[in-house]
Amino acid sequence: MELSVIWQRFRANTRAYVSLWIFGVLVVVSVIAPCIANQKPLFIYHEGRAYFPIFVDYPETTFGGDFESFTDYLDPYVSDVLLKDSFVLRTLIPYNPETILFDLHTPSPTSPDSVHWLGTDDKGRDVLARMLYGLRTSLAFGFILTICVLIIGVSVGALQGYYGGSIDLFGQRLIEIWNSIPILFVIIIVANTIAPSFWWILGIVLAFSWIGLASVVRAEFLKIRNLEFVKAARVLGFSDWRIMTRHILPNAMVATITYLPFIMATGIITLGSLDFLGFGTQDASLGELLAQGKNNLTSPHLGISAFLIVSILLSVLVFVGEGLRDALDPRAHRDL
């Protein structure tokens, strides 16, 4: 099926097409999050020279201060004295996700206002800044997990499905044993042994996430390997590698591609669940914001904000996946 036909079918699905645009906007916002929420200014013009603090850490002495340490641009002495006559272009949200604000007029968590659009959390940190960086972490986790699952799942499923026999039988028994291990217990054990990090959690989740895709690819290879064009390729003397990659895999990619958005959604849910339970990363995350909403019922803005962004992100991924499934289905008939 030609790509143009697939794209036309996908565009005909309004819900999936709009969801793809929304997802694209979320990805762009997460990528440029440091340029949106950062206590470092984007640009400073001081005494005839241009500085870019968002890319370079300048010591305070650069602007006439007394210390060699990196400049704290939220320090009133820096902003009101050292940079008083300078042009300073700040980010839209002049706070890092870990910046603790000590000048709040009421005890934290505070409600949304004109300065903190989504309020602050129970530690006095800007919620919108943490949400942007939490979205960035979730999408990075989902993208990396999906790519790695694609490589491992397709490789394992292709080998099992193409060769079959003892290789398939032995592989299925290993997968059944491996799949019976509860992933949550493994993460709890690791979290109690070492400090959990992004890459540790990614590795553990990846170790169990490829099984579903491998089963889908295996089923497709088992179905296609006995078709006439594959038998013809064998008669012509083509290598197994060429037959798998050039002849069978392209025909099995329909089921594989439609599976990918759901893998990403599952990875984001898993990371958010671990952060919510306290076994995730120590960085800003959507799951941690949900946990704060549970722990601070008198500040509903915490839970509502995190719930909305998680709901939107997962919904658009599911809608895009459904649109891909329908667009790639040769039996689907749509009015273009």
Image (cartoon, grey):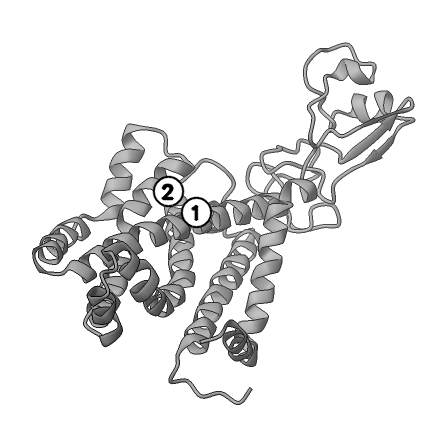
Q: On the picture, is 6 further left or further right than 58?
A: left
Crowding at dot 2, Cα within 10 Å, few <14 / some 14-19 / many 20+, comes out as some
Q: Looking at the picture, does residue 91 appear above or below residue 251? A: above
Label 2 or label 1, whichever comes before in sequence order: 1
Residue placed at 55% from the left, 40% from the top? 122
Q: Which mark is residue 144?
A: 1
Question: Do the numbered discs 2 and 1 sit on residues whose CB atoms are within 8 Å?
Answer: yes
The three-letter amino acid code for the residue at tag 2 is: Leu
The kind of secondary structure element at disc 1 is: helix
Residue placed at 67% from the left, 37% from the top? 38
Q: Position of residue 29 (x, y in %)?
A: 63, 51
Q: Looking at the picture, does residue 49 appear above or below residue 291? A: above
Q: Looking at the picture, does residue 50 appear above or below residue 70? A: below
Residue placed at 44% from the left, 76% from the top? 1
- Can you see residue 241? yes
The three-letter amino acid code for the residue at tag 1 is: Ile
The kind of secondary structure element at disc 2 is: helix
Which residue corresponds to mark 2?
Answer: 202
